[in-house]
Image (tube, rainbow, N blue to C red):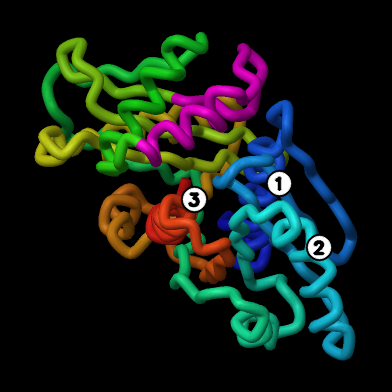
Amino acid sequence: MEAPQNSLVEKIEVNLAEYSFFLGQIKQGQIYDGREVKWVSTGGPIFNRILNAHFEPEELNQRITETVARFKAANTPVTWLIGPATQPLTLGSQLEKHGFTYRGYWHGMALDLNHLSERPQVAAGLTVERVKDYQALKDWIDLACSGFQFSAKVTQAYQETLGNLRLNANTPWKPYIALIKGQPVATCVMYTGSQAAGLYWTATLPAAREHSVGTGLTWELLREAREMGYSTAVLHSTQMGLPLYERLGFQDYCKIKIYTWDNRSKLLQTLVKIKAKLHL
């Protein structure tokens, strides 16, 4: 029996919030888990997020000003995510009046793991390994950024943040690498949340994109999530990623709208634009 659509939408939003909170657990990070709004500050230029807002319409402008004040005071960019549960419906238009820029949306997708398809046809010699130490994590970050074709400066910003995340056998943030005949070619993260397993950071080197590596890697993580006891997998896809996930059986249930504010630094503007294009 399939889960009701509203239940799946909740799982999509909850996993995104849990994942975002984990990113805020680095040494200089801060997390606010309020009833009316949640936010994450990493202390750097990336992964600063505001989400799950539930404001009264008559207090909207005041609450936006209060919530964004800490990021503006620190001169750090921030992304405000608006999902189906966000209230009021006018939040997006009011954010633009406060200096935010609309960057499009992610597709909130879910898959019933009880209906996971058979293993797809993939390149010969494809293997998948979990990253378990910090040197391997550094190499993983370089590979992921190469897959997204980031510049050296952008890659360094991700190294400085992701390289400080908690990494052990029990961490819910589980990075994986795909190899073809021993050569690293793709990355993905599985976030094992309270209600679902979420997939993030799916990136493939350009030279390997003709070999269904992303499909094979994603399927292996879905199989592992099912073996862990999860019945639902979720992700937040760009338009470009939709065909891959639909082939694996994911269905599109909602939109996560993306609004960004930055302090006009060229590097920071590049980072927030990248975050809006790709779901990381």
Q: x%, y% of residue 141? A: 40, 27
Q: Identify residue type, mark 2.
A: Val
Magenta-colored span: 153-175
Q: CA distance from mark 1 to mark 3?
A: 22 Å
The one nearer the camera, 258 or 198, is 258
Under circle 3, the secondary element is: strand
Q: Identify residue type, mark 1.
A: Ser
From the image, state whether disc 1 or disc 3 is nearer to you. Answer: 1
Mark 2: give few (<14), some (14-19) or many (20+) Cα within 10 Å. Answer: some
Q: Identify residue type, mark 3.
A: Leu
- Residue at (57%, 35%) from the top-left corner? 191
Give the residue pinned by disc 3. 235
Q: How many marks?
A: 3
- Residue at (47%, 69%) from the top-left corner? 105
Left or right: residue 255 compared with residue 138: right
Residue 37 circle label: 2
- Disc 1 + disc 2, Cβ < 8 Å: no
